[in-house]
Amino acid sequence: MKPVVKKFKKVLIANRGEIAIRVIRSCRELGIETVSVHSTADEDSLHVKMADESVCVGPAKSSLSYLNIPQILSAADITGADAIHPGYGFLSENEEFAEMCSKWGLTFIGPSVACLKSMGDKIESKITAKKADVPTLEPIYVKDSTDDFIQKEVEKMGFPVLIKASAGGGGRGMKRIDSFEELWPAISRLQEEAKAAFGDGTLFIEKYIENPRHIEVQILADKYKNVIHLGERDCTIQRRFQKILEEAPSPVLTPEVREEICQAAVRLAQFVDYDSVGTVEFLYDQDTQKFYFMEMNTRIQVEHPVTEGRTGVDLIAEQIRHAQGEEIRFKQSDILFRNHVMEFRINAEDPRTGMPSPGNITHYHRPGGIGVRTDDYIYTGYTVPPYYDSMISKIIVQADNRANCITRAKRVLNETVVSGIQTNLSLHKEILNDPDFIESRFSTNYLSKKLI
């Protein structure tokens, strides 16, 4: 099929903070005008100041602003936008929003609605992955099962197990269970939480891997069935299933496993006719060197700069190009992997408890020097609002190997100053100085066992 390319003149960014700024920058380099949207709480945010135009779409509450589909579509209409980039979170994987964009004559910068539907549901996506010959952990589905069935299946599986909400994301709707006494109350509680948070109380149970790493593979795909991978990221350092530090390449994968896991991700993307930037996430069992499909994120990831640092590919620009109808500009053999890259998520929170710490930033000093990138939206005098995710900055560090990357990261984090609010900078410094992290002796429960 011959490519049909429709160049965008103006893109509306249906998001806020650092990801909105990140999209603005790529659009500028592509010669595309930008429109930002904002809530009343974000009037002074940097993404509002940087866009060519900005439209207020509602009050502080996300459901009335950043999740308000009619308001966002109206903002696109009155500003004459051709397309909408959803960033991550909010409406980025909302199939209804993608369908509405199409009805309004707007291009949704992301995968097709069919891909959003097939890979957005964690249960359906596991079934699909199995059909694509991608290794999966066999789940127990809770929604229509009886207590007797669940009891028998869990007895076969053996504790510990992990309960997950099918519609969950970002670490929410998940709990490790070690006994039947814990299981039944947890199922009831998680069903209610999932209904309230995601509108869907469907749960599933799978075997809990005791010594896992969280490995994800970056996918690049176009509308003409071309798919390549841009390597893996190791996202194992997490707090309550929320990633806080990512790195690439993974220090524990052998070259053979790395090739297998990357090809499995490509195979799945090809199987579902994926057509945008995306990420396939796996659980890697360090004891057996086997990996299992967890889910597919049908959007750009928070940690995409790690891959950009490794490959030199602007993922946002490629995502926009593919939405315009362009083919992938690279072959797999064109992708060159270099350096070791780490990303540190800087959150406005208590470094020990993780409780949010909004407020006024009295002084902010951004780090610099060779091999350093900072994606942020804060500045001295800015007030971090209490209504949204606590991440205020991402510091990305790269060097020629992991040891030198850690050394450089120590210098960079010591150079970073955020005054007036609490942040998790001290937690990152503690991690960087820990022998187990330095020697890569850790799993996803590292923080819960060692530091928290």
Image (tube, grey):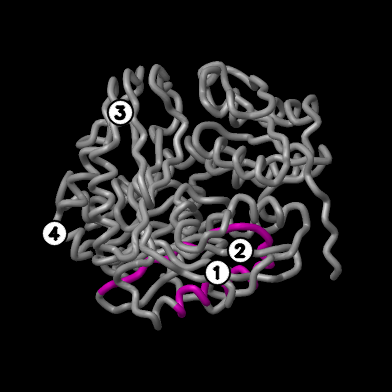
Tell me the kind of residue under disc 3. Answer: Val
Circle 4 crowding by C-alpha within 10 Å: few under 14, some 14–19, many from 20? few
Q: Secondary structure at mark 4?
A: helix
Residue at x 60% of width, y 50% of height: 316
CA separation, marks 4 and 2? Answer: 35 Å
Residue that sits furthest to the front in the current view: 370
The residue identified by callout 3 is 418
Q: Position of residue 85 (x, y in %)?
A: 66, 42
Q: Is residue 109 left or right of residue 144?
A: right
Which of marks 1 and 2 precedes in the sequence?
2
Tag 3 near tag 1, CB within 8 Å: no
The residue identified by callout 4 is 435
Tell me the kind of residue under disc 4. Answer: Pro
The residue identified by callout 2 is 220
Specify the quadrant that holds the N terminus.
bottom right
Q: Nearer the viewer, mark 3 or mark 1?
A: 3
Q: Position of residue 302 (x, y in %)?
A: 47, 47
Residue that sits furthest to the bottom in the current view: 256
